[in-house]
Amino acid sequence: MKAVFLLPFLVALSAGNVVKQQEKELEWWETAIIYQIYPRSFADSDGDGIGDLKGITSKLEYIKEIGAGAIWLSPIFQSPMYDFGYDIADFYAIHDEYGTMEDFDELLEKANELEIKIVLDLVPNHTSNESVWFQEALNGNEKYIDYFVWEDGIVDENGNRQPPNNWRSHFRGSAWEYREEVGKYYLHQFVVGQPDLNYRNPDVIEEMKDIIRFWLNKGVAGFRVDAVNCLFEVDKALFNGIYPDEPMSGRTDVDPESHDYLSHIYTKDQDETYYMVYEWRDIFDEYTEKDGLPRVMMTEVYASIQNVVRYYGEGDKEGAQMPFNFDLITDVDASSSAADIKRAVDKFLTYKPVHKNANWVVGNHDNSRMATRYGPLLVDGINMIVLLLPGVGVTYMGEEIGMVDGYVSWEDTVDPSGCNTNDPINYVISSRDPERTPFQWNSEKNSGFSTADKTWLPVAEGYESLNVENQKVAERSHIKVYQALADLRKDKAFQYGRYDSLALNNDVFVFRRWYNGETFIVVVNMRDAEYVVDLTYFENVSGEATVVITSIQSSKEGGDVFDVSALPVAGYEGIVLRLI
């Protein structure tokens, strides 16, 4: 009989512990919106047509105003700009077009005043062929020769020297480049000016750790780690000291010069890479223990979901807090059904460790803009998904106003992905310039981005109407919806609440967040079709709900009340409801 009375007590005690754990104090990155800035295109302070650090500093109040709690800056380090900052010549210096170290310190100081965290872009896989390290290697310095991956070429049947194997660069063509000074080929998985670093050399590992420490000492709140799954190549000792050819991918839609022509089993996703990330996390945590500021690591990996989630950690080894989730970029778009959206969302939630945070990304500097891929009418609905799903919301600059890809002619194209096609017609398929066009602040010259006569990339057409200034004064606008969503994220239902989702039909995706008796339901119609939907398919959902936020084309108003068993939904409408 004692056990009968004890069991309810234990259940109640356990439930109490769960609630207490759920309401633990969250770290800053768990609740913040992380806003990506492409510095070259955000704000130009000196009229040279190129964005810079002073320009970013001048716009920090805007970041605060829209509700973002952190900015992630694409690379700001000294670079010859073959790949626009991802070819770093000096990891310890600011690129001169962007400003000085003093400018960065001012940015950091102003951000701290506004309680905005700064996250930098770390590019550990490679450096620049103009770096001191690479130049020293060319001069015969053995220490720095071993900083890079070198290999002898082969001689073909005609007596001509050829690359060591068939490995392909992400930017087309061989991933190997010969240097007479060394008498060998060096590996560059990206452009020729980006020689890969040799992570089988302990000196390289320590050098990169010192770089991390340098910037953490300055007070940055973490790093987004670029192309991290390319860090290690297979150990050639396993193949008699020769790097093996990679097998063909089987894709028939690409030519032999394309990176996608091969399956990259020897140059990506090597086991050693994950453990390198875990070692970096140890450094982050050391700094957190010193000053109490949690440092966040975000890893960029386009890989299988099984490989992506390995970056979270293994056993007692902690890894990245945010292995970027690109499923809303790679798996779905304007053509997708509600079921497709549900599958893309549920995939990451299913595979990630149950105690780790999810994250949601719908755009960045490498992919066509969200409003272009999904269509301008879905901007608010997609932002509802990104900002109200459980986990961290990441916004690429311009998504809050619905910026679309800009047109960049062949003559104005500068991105190596486009230029290396040598195709003045089809370059647009590969070029990343359209999503990098200058930020649209107002309807003035160059959209208020710069006073220069010519900007580094042309401003997108239509900026006269699609810009921040216009949306601030409009009665209804994307930016006002975004601000409302950012504010709603602070509710405990979105910080601690449970999640469930449904595809009510082919077009209408819905999800709910609930916590301690409060329930919100988010409705997104992916098509231009009207429906009356029944939300009682969710368990414990009945009665009425009040409108909290709607997309700009909605005829509904905040405070309107609807029967949840018969909710009218207009074409492309997005709605956030609170159950009464």
Image (tube, rainbow, N blue to C red):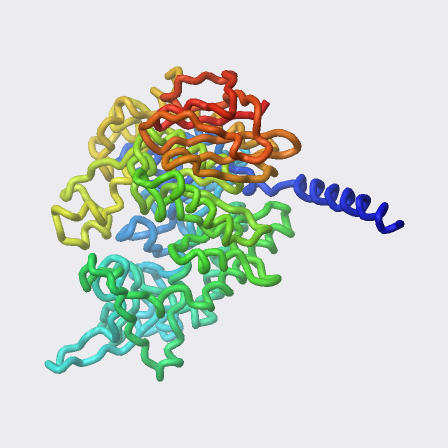
Whether 314 is drawn above or below 26: the answer is below
**Residue in the image at 37% along x and 24% along y:** 570
> How many numbered marks are there?
0
Q: Which residue is at the front of the view, 513 or 192?
A: 513
Nearest the eye: 99 or 211: 211
Asked if residue 390 is positioned above or below residue 400 in the image, the reply reads below
> Is residue 102 shown to the viewer in this render?
no
- State left or right for residue 519 relative to residue 305: right
- Determine whether, in the image, residue 47 is placed left or right of residue 339: left
Tell me where residue 524 sits by quadrant.
top left
Residue 505 visible at all: yes
The C terminus sits in image quarter: top right
Vertical position of residue 475 compared to residue 212: above or below:
above
Which residue lies at the image location 54% right of the left edge and 32% below the top edge? 489
Residue under the point 41% across and 53% down = 300
Residue 12 appears at what percent x and percent y? 77, 42
- The image shows residue 117 at horizontal and vertical percentages of 51, 40
What residue do we see at 35% from left, 62% from top?
Answer: 132
Rendering coords of residue 235 (x, y %): 40, 75
Name of the residue lying farthest toward the right:
2
Q: Is residue 73 left or right of residue 436?
A: right
Q: Nearer the viewer, residue 413 or 538?
A: 538
Which percent across, then down, holds residue 44? 32, 34
Residue at the extreme left = 158
